[in-house]
Image (cartoon, rainbow, N blue to C red):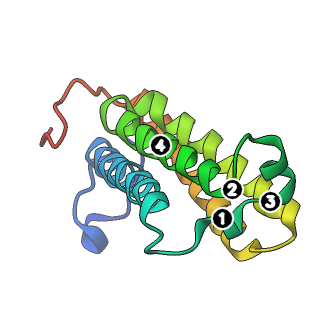
């Protein structure tokens, strides 16, 4: 991997770009494995929030069943997306990014929860960064490896 110019050693110590990229990759993979799984499971528990409030009426009208049933389906998709990030981050990152785009569109279309939409837009960009890192790095190491 090509090494990029780093800050002077007197400021940060020697910085290996590949090591930094792998650390960023591990942080993002941990985030995008854990968060979708936790949020997905919470769709069944409603401990963190009442999830149906975030479903735009037009989306609710498109999906069969009740808003609660839609949120249960969302929960399953989120858990599966988190698992996909854990095992195939180069694919899972883009699945999560697409999912986050859908959430942002849903929230913005409501004209409500724009703070959550902005947060999710930031997470979308981070998921894209994870996908790029996963594609760029040699990922033959095992999950949790030290390479």
- Tell me the residue at 54%/42% (across/down): 96
Image location of residue 13, percent across then percent down:
22, 65
Q: Earlier along the polypeptide chain: callout 2 or callout 1?
A: 1
Q: At numbered mark 3, what does the secondary structure look like: helix, strand or loop? A: loop
In the depicted structure, whether residue 84 falls above or below residue 130: above
Res 85 quadrant in image: top left
Q: CA distance from mark 3 to mark 1?
A: 9 Å
Label annotation for residue 3:
none
Q: To which residue does mark 2 refer? A: 67
Q: CA distance from mark 4 to mark 2?
A: 14 Å
Q: To which residue does mark 4 refer? A: 76
Q: Earlier along the polypeptide chain: callout 4 or callout 3?
A: 3
Q: To which residue does mark 1 refer? A: 52
In the picture, measured across the screen, residue 143 lies left or right of residue 65, that is left
Mark 1: few/some/many CA within 10 Å (<14, 14-19, 20+): some
Q: CA distance from mark 4 to mark 3?
A: 19 Å
């Amino acid at each position: 991997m090509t090494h990029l110019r780093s800050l002077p050693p007197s400021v940060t110590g020697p910085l290996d770009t590949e090591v930094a990229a792998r650390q960023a990759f591990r942080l993002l993979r941990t985030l995008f494995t854990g968060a979708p799984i936790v949020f997905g499971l919470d769709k069944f528990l409603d401990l963190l929030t009442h999830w149906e409030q975030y479903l735009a009426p037009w989306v609710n009208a498109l999906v069969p069943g009740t808003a609660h049933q839609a949120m249960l389906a969302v929960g399953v998709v989120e858990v599966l997306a988190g698992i996909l990030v854990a095992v195939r981050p180069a694919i899972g990152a883009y699945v999560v990014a697409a999912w986050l785009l859908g959430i942002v569109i849903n929230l913005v279309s409501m004209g409500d929860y724009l703070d959550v939409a902005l947060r999710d837009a930031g997470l979308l960009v981070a998921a894209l960064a994870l996908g790029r890192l996963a594609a760029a790095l040699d990922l033959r190491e095992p999950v949790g490896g030290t390479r």
